[in-house]
Image (tube, rainbow, N blue to C red):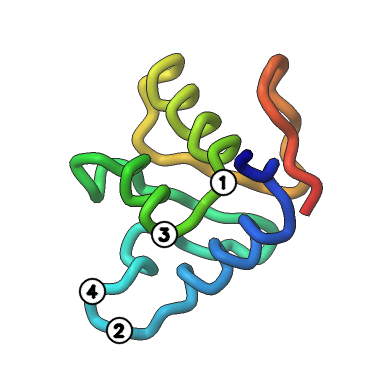
Amino acid sequence: MESLPTETDNAWLYSLSHQTSDFGESEWIHFTGSGYLLRTDAWSYPVLQLKRLGLSKTFRRLVVTLIRRYGVSLIHLDASAECLPGLPTFNW
């Protein structure tokens, strides 16, 4: 059974967003100080890439929902933002 979004997702996103290699994950996952920006158009299959990187199924479902429901390619996850109704909340 896959775990719910936890500090593990936050730790992965933080680590990935701070990579210093020329073509690392920090090219499309950016730390903002209070959350993250995900540029989902940087990959043909961004959710598959998130799975390969170890992000939880719940987190990946959130990304899929935002892409499909709202047609977004830039997702801003922010600790002080309003919650969207019907979507999971991450306690980071």
Q: Which mark is residue 21?
A: 2
Neighbor class of circle 1 (other Cα within 10 Å; few <14, some 14-19, many 20+) is: some
Q: Is residue 15 above or below residue 65?
A: below
Who comes first in sequence, dot 1 or dot 4?
Answer: 4
| The C terminus lies in quadrant | bottom right
Helix, strand or loop at disc 3? helix
What is the number of the mark on residue 56?
1
Q: Nearer the viewer, residue 74 or 63?
A: 63
Residue at image position (40%, 26%) is 67
Q: CA distance from mark 4 to mark 2?
A: 6 Å
Position of residue 48 measured from the top left corner of the image (x, y, whole percent): 32, 43
Describe the element under mark 4 as helix, strand or loop: loop
Q: Are marks 4 and 2 in contact (CB under 8 Å)?
A: yes
Instruction: State the residue position of label 4.
Output: 23
51 relative position to 22: left or right: right
Q: Nearer the viewer, residue 79 or 2?
A: 2
Q: Position of residue 39 (x, y in %)?
A: 36, 48
Amino acid under disc 2:
Ser
The residue under the point 46% across, 69% down is 16
Q: Secondary structure at mark 1?
A: loop
Q: Estimate the x, y position of residue 14 in percent, counting from the top left.
A: 58, 68
Q: Identify residue type, mark 4.
A: Phe
User: How far, Cα to Cα, is label 1 from label 3?
Assistant: 9 Å
Name the residue carrying label 3: 53
Three-letter amino acid code at the position of disc 3: Leu
Q: Are marks 1 and 4 in contact (CB under 8 Å)?
A: no
